[in-house]
Image (cartoon, rainbow, N blue to C red):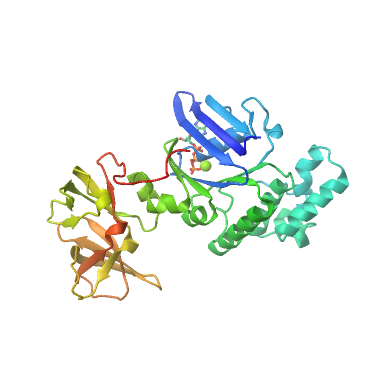
Amino acid sequence: MTGYALQLHEVAKDFGAARVVEDFSLDVADGELIVLVGPSGCGKSTLLRMIAGLEDVSEGAVVIAGQEMNHVPPGRRGIAMVFQNYALYPHMTVAQNMGFALRNERLPASEIERRVDEAADKLKIGQLLSRKPAQLSGGQRQRVAIGRAIVREPDVFLFDEPLSNLDAALRVQTRVEIAKLHADLGNTIIYVTHDQVEAMTLADRIVVMNAGRVEQIGTPEEIYTRPRSRFVAAFIGTPMMNFIDGRVADGRFTSGSGLAVALPPRLSAADGPAVLGIRPEHLRIAGSAAWEPALHGRLQVQEYLGERMLMHVALDHGPEVVATGAVALPQDETVRMTFDHEHLHLFDPQGRALGAVAGTGAC
Ligand SMILES: Nc1ncnc2c1ncn2[C@@H]1O[C@H](COP(=O)(O)OP(=O)(O)OP(=O)(O)O)[C@@H](O)[C@H]1O
Ligand SMILES: [Mg+2]
């Protein structure tokens, strides 16, 4: 054993002349939960399908539990996949749906029943086993689809946006169930989602993909606090990080508009054109207290979110930014904003993060 449940070595995928996955390498430890995120069309489903064996790899290797799988058929890879558009057999009961793959494997009926009961219990659908899919809610159906994967007792689970059909409340509930299940079973999981909260809360590590490539691999905290590129910084975090174009000289960032910010030591070695990044929660509307205001502008729109307010502010000589406020202010009010220098980000014109970015290389 390698200690790795799954390894991808420089995997690439071509559809005709189009390369949709490129030089993709990832080592997944036993029991790890990896979340794959990235814009639509960046290759997430294709990657899962290559791991499952539903697509061939054009280059590179898929290794499961130390064994190369490139030419091993899907059924013999020790993998179960939950598709986004899972289809349950409408004429079968929940129990029959869940046991279907096991019947195909010719497992004894008693073993099938044991596994189905156990999975149903974990997913809290034990009372639904004799119903047909049409008699279930969307969330219950989703859990049956997950149950169908669990009963196979795979080494690796692949989930392709498993919760995307659910309403917000059910998503949260099912997300927590998946987290518990993972804690309980300790299986290795590769999980694709568009939902950032799902990514941040479930992942041991997040893989951010961009146009078929790995953009960054790291723990949720690394990805959020030390994005390696402007792409990752913009992709993770809602509302999006604010970006201000300018240049760095002598440890100061200035934008054409007269904005001047002293950079913290970790960023002050930069020189030349650069983009300053500040997350909305780190940019706060300042009261009239006497600390040095770094940015000012005119309030355009404010959004009340209960525990805080998002303030859209047009900088006096710059772009519109989103800041956090505690109290409502009159429209068009001129506001001052302060920020903690520790939370500043800086990117070069190619979008690479400047300054110390530790522990975030492709693994
Ligand atoms: N069978 C196929 N033949 C040709 N091109 C394909 C095929 N399957 C996928 N593609 C292309 O490969 C690229 C990656 O698709 P993929 O489905 O992996 O994206 P994704 O990241 O899962 O997107 P989404 O978030 O929308 O589900 C897309 O440009 C898609 O059009
Ligand atoms: Mg997809």
Q: Is residue 349 left or right of residue 227?
A: left
Determine the residue positioned at 36% across, 46% down: 357
Quadrant of the image occupied by residue 307: bottom left
Does residue 54 appear in this view? no
Q: Closer to the camera, 242 or 99?
A: 242
Task: Point out the image quarter for the N terminus.
Answer: top right
Q: Closer to the camera, 42 or 325?
A: 325
- Residue 341 in the image: state x and y as whole percent: 27, 59
- Residue 236 in the image: state x and y as whole percent: 41, 52
Determine the residue positioned at 75% across, 59% down: 121
Q: Closer to the camera, 8 or 359?
A: 359
Up the image or down, 21 lies above or below 115; here it is: above
Q: Is residue 172 left or right of residue 342?
A: right
Name, please, the residue furthest toward the front: 265
Instruction: Count up the numbered dots.
Output: 0
Up the image or down, 72 lies above or below 33; here it is: above
Does residue 20 appear in this view? yes
Quadrant of the image occupied by residue 338: bottom left
Determine the residue positioned at 36% across, 49% down: 233
Determine the residue positioned at 18% across, 47% down: 248
Quadrant of the image occupied by residue 135: bottom right
- Residue 342 in the image: state x and y as whole percent: 30, 58
- Residue 343 in the image: state x and y as whole percent: 31, 57
Q: Is residue 191 left or right of residue 132?
A: left
